[in-house]
Amino acid sequence: MTKQNKGRKLFATTATAALVASAIVPVASAAELNDFDSVASWAKDAVKSLVDSGAVQGDNNGNFNPTKELTRAQGAEILAKVLDLKAEGTEDYSDVTSSNWFYDAVRATSPELFIGNEKGEFNPNDNLTRQEAAKVLVNAFELSGSESLDSFRDASKAGKWAINYLETAVANGVINGKGSLLAPTDTITNQEFATMVKRAQDAAVPAVTAVSATNTTDLKVTLGGNLKDVTVTAEDFEVTVDGTKVSFTVEKVSEKEYTLKLSSALVAGAKVEVVGLKDLDGSKASTTYSPISITSVDAVATTVVDNKDGQTLKIKANGVETTPAELAAQGYTVSFVASKNVFGAAASTSTTGELDEAQLATLLSSAKQTDFTYRVSVQKDNVVVTSKSADVLIIDADQTAVSEIKTVDLGDVAAVGVNNNATSASYTIDTLTGNKLVVGETVDVEGVVATLADGRNDIDLIATTGNVSYESSDVRIATVSGNTITAKGVGTVTIKVKSGNISKDITLQIVEAPRKLSLATVSKSSLNLAHGAAVPVLVTLKDQYGETFGSKTDLVPVEAKNTANTAITTTTAAGGTDDATNGEFYYTITAATGVTGAGKVEFNHANSAKLASTSVTVGAAASTTTFKLELNKNTINLNPASTDSKITLTLNEYGASGQYVGAADLDDYTVEIFDANGTPISNITGANLEGAVDNGIYELTRHNLIAENANAVVAGTTYPSISNFETGTGLIKVTDTVSGDVYSANFTITDSAPTVNSATFLDGFEIKSGVNVTAPLSTFLTKVGTTATAGDGIVRYEVDGTDANLVHMYYETANTPDGYDYGTDVYLGRLETNFVSGGSSAVLDFTTDGSGNVTFDATADTTNATFQFDVVKRGAATTASSVVKKNIVVKP
């Protein structure tokens, strides 16, 4: 298992908290708390664990005060220390000042955990309630999961905003309730909060929590904890059957469910244990295998399409979806009986439930849709269990019916913000990452990603079919027109996103307080500069709700000063192109001349609150300097959809003590770039290298690597070479033409774009000499599969403009298909024809009419000639290989 550190601010598994008011006294163990004996028995273990680890301390009298009510300020202090949060940003609460003991804690936990009221107040002395505790702990430890609150008699008393948090807290055991009561609005005590913190910590640790055998070879393993940045592999498990280790493979079902497929079958009574390894270490679960006894069977209503092979009717046994193969492994025989011949031309029964593609098309005929019913039965030991009938709808694949809406993306927020001087801050937020809108704001539904009934995955309905509608649960709070949501009034609202009869709900919280500058980060934490050296830094701004803040009016740079209180820097708003939609603003920090020392350039709020800073050291550069070739990033991805599309290369000069002096003009040097295959990129000059910027700073792009040329697209080249998609390690060399010194840097080339990986040539297709055969390509080539999808998920074809032996395959990413675009569309591979032998001519060309029809142009002298047809996937010289081939002899 590997865990990727993505710099998450909130989540931590090591607690370092203090249950405090304004003063604390360290205690080494729970025994040293004067009132530990007063802690309730159910809380003792949690309190002892936190105290013994140094997480919890007593007050200035050495007391824990277990039954004392906890305030919001104390809760913020605890979580700031538990999570080791930095006191960055400000919420500018009217009732929180820098003289308060909880000032840093409030800055550290707002707005990610705690938010104020609509009057701009934090209310630090208000008592924390159980529903508020649920919210902050679920967010702090990034807990997931949901459990109904129906078992609690007073669940209706919970605030609408708190229901999801309470459901997650209950599901993770953080809140167990007070008997049959949830008591969401009750205040919380020190011992209750300590217990909840410990439970949340335990719930967040990745672990094996349950295992069950779904059949003789498959184990269903359930994981608990925070798995957001965890990659689970077979190395994370050890499986024993009756004490003996067995081999297995792993299939991911969901983030928290995996199937372990055993290499040998289980027998009745076998004891199975799954032990977690690596990041799951210390956890385990066990079960005893018992063959299932089926008491109920259900057929499942579904929708199928007319042109997809491999579609199978579904079956549930004892309420759980399963397959005929899994039931066969349990000793059952399965029989599907349909009301129409859907399993073949004269077959209405089946043991597998697999539908016949051609028969579905025949039944559909010219209609847009038709239907049939089916029932399923299982038999074992002369006992037969039969389901009721279920309806199945057959639809025309061109109707692009949706089977699941996976995600809904919101963006282009017309933000309602305010500056410190009360002037309006109007800007656009590119992507809404949370669920809060301010009254008066609008946000666009920019993407509705769905799985279609014909099997296409990750298709954006907004960009393709446009078949999306919306419903608001309360038009007083929010309305929807077209794809735009307008925030009308304060409250929580549900927007139902629909396509056909499939829907997905998104919840928005509409607030009254305008957005204001609250957080800032700087791209460089420290700088070591020579006199006069200038370096651009990127400052990213956030509002109190954690979203982009697109105005720098309230951002005030404060120069670094040395110990003599002399400014050693000059900071100006320059150095790059600002992107207000993402809250990104460039500033250039220039070292003063004639003075030395160290200090911090601060980026403060106009109200004087410190938001962020960069440490700066300024000194005179030595007479001897060195150069270093540096890249702004180390990876280029050949996928057009990736943001890793280019690398900026700069030759920087440094003094002997590491002071940055400046960047060399690369136009005065020889620049060489080699791809992963060692092939040089030609025409490397300031004029030709795509994206070359001022002062000889070069940008290498994905286009340069695919074209093997410094121009974006080589003149006359409409399609990329199929074997130019090399991945691996590339090399950049910069040579001083005077001294001969060489500076080099490696970079990584990746390719996450889909490629063609399967196809089938149909039998019975004939080509006759002297006869142009015109037909849809699908009558010759079908079942074209790809490793993933892009755009609308439809593989498109174009005959090469200069080589008529080639048909290129690609995914169109434009909203309106407009032909292959080198820069944005995903190139998959190609269909090609090559002469093998025979005949007196070696020419067989393709032409197209632009409507999906391809003409096979075989001249009269190709009689008895053999041509080889190949579907070739995109890749490197060694990987751009044929995935399927077929030889055809031209008939007279």
Image (tube, rainbow, N blue to C red):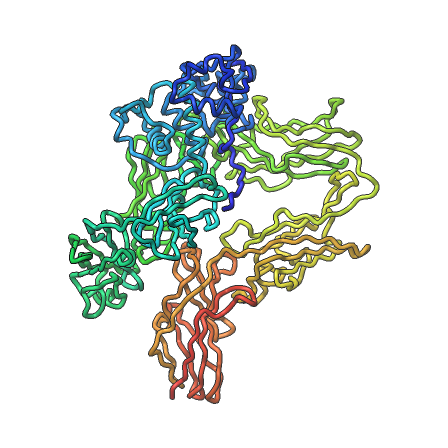
Q: Is residue 532 left or right of residue 688?
A: right
| Residue 547 percent location from the top left of the image | 47, 34
Residue furthest to the front: 243
Number of callouts: 0
Does residue 805 appear in this view?
A: yes
Q: Is residue 660 left or right of residue 313?
A: right
User: From the viewer's perspective, is residue 529 above or below residue 640?
Assistant: above
Q: Nearer the viewer, residue 47 or 339?
A: 47
Does residue 487 appear in this view?
A: no
User: From the viewer's perspective, is residue 809 above or below residue 652?
Assistant: below
| Residue 317 percent location from the top left of the image | 23, 51
Q: Nearer the viewer, residue 388 or 453?
A: 388
Q: At 76% from the left edge and 42% from the top edge, which residue is drawn?
A: 654
Residue furthest to the right: 623
Q: Nearer the viewer, residue 35 or 520?
A: 35
Q: Is residue 500 left or right of residue 735?
A: left
Q: Is residue 50 left or right of residue 525?
A: left
| Residue 860 percent location from the top left of the image | 42, 87
| Residue 25 percent location from the top left of the image | 55, 15
Q: At 78% from the left edge and 46% from the top edge, which residue is drawn?
A: 626
Q: At 79% from the left edge and 40% from the top edge, which residue is drawn?
A: 656
Quadrant in the rendering for residue 561: top right
Figure quadrant of the C terminus? bottom left
